[in-house]
Image: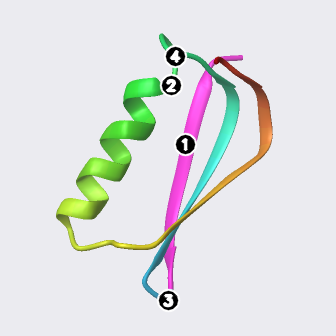
Amino acid sequence: MGFQLVAREIERVVVVEAVGRLTLTDGHTQLRDLIHVSTGDGARKFVINLARGEFIDS
């Protein structure tokens, strides 16, 4: 399985659910871009749920 991000906003907090394998090639830029765009839109608080993450590359 690759890597997917699902983001939603709850009371001015961006909740990001990461699913799959977070590696330098698969998910690194997706997560960085999501946070960059969200902060550009004014978001300042994030929760990143890694419960469904299978693997995180060091």
Marks 1,3: beta carbons within 8 A: no
Q: Residue at x 23, y 73 (%)?
A: 42
Residue at numbered disc 4: 26
Q: Which residue is mark 3?
A: 11
Tag 4: residue type? Asp
Residue type beneath disc 2: Gly
Question: Residue at position x 48%, y 10% from top?
Answer: 25
Q: CA distance from mark 2 to mark 4?
A: 4 Å
- From the image, which quarter does the N terminus lie in? top right
Which amino acid, by three-letter code, is at mark 3?
A: Glu
Residue at numbered disc 2: 27
Q: Dot 1 surroundings within 10 Å: few (below 14), some, or many (20 or more)?
A: some
Tag 2 near tag 4, CB within 8 Å: yes
- Mark nearer the N terminus (3 vs 2): 3
**Is tag 1's residue or tag 3's residue first in the polypeptide sequence?**
1
**x then y, percent, for residue 18:** 64, 42
Residue 10 at what x, y percent from top left? Answer: 53, 81
Q: Quadrant of the C terminus?
A: top right
* Residue 6 located within the stretch drawn in magenta: yes
| Residue that badge 1 annotates | 5
Identify whether 24 is placed above or below 6.
Answer: above
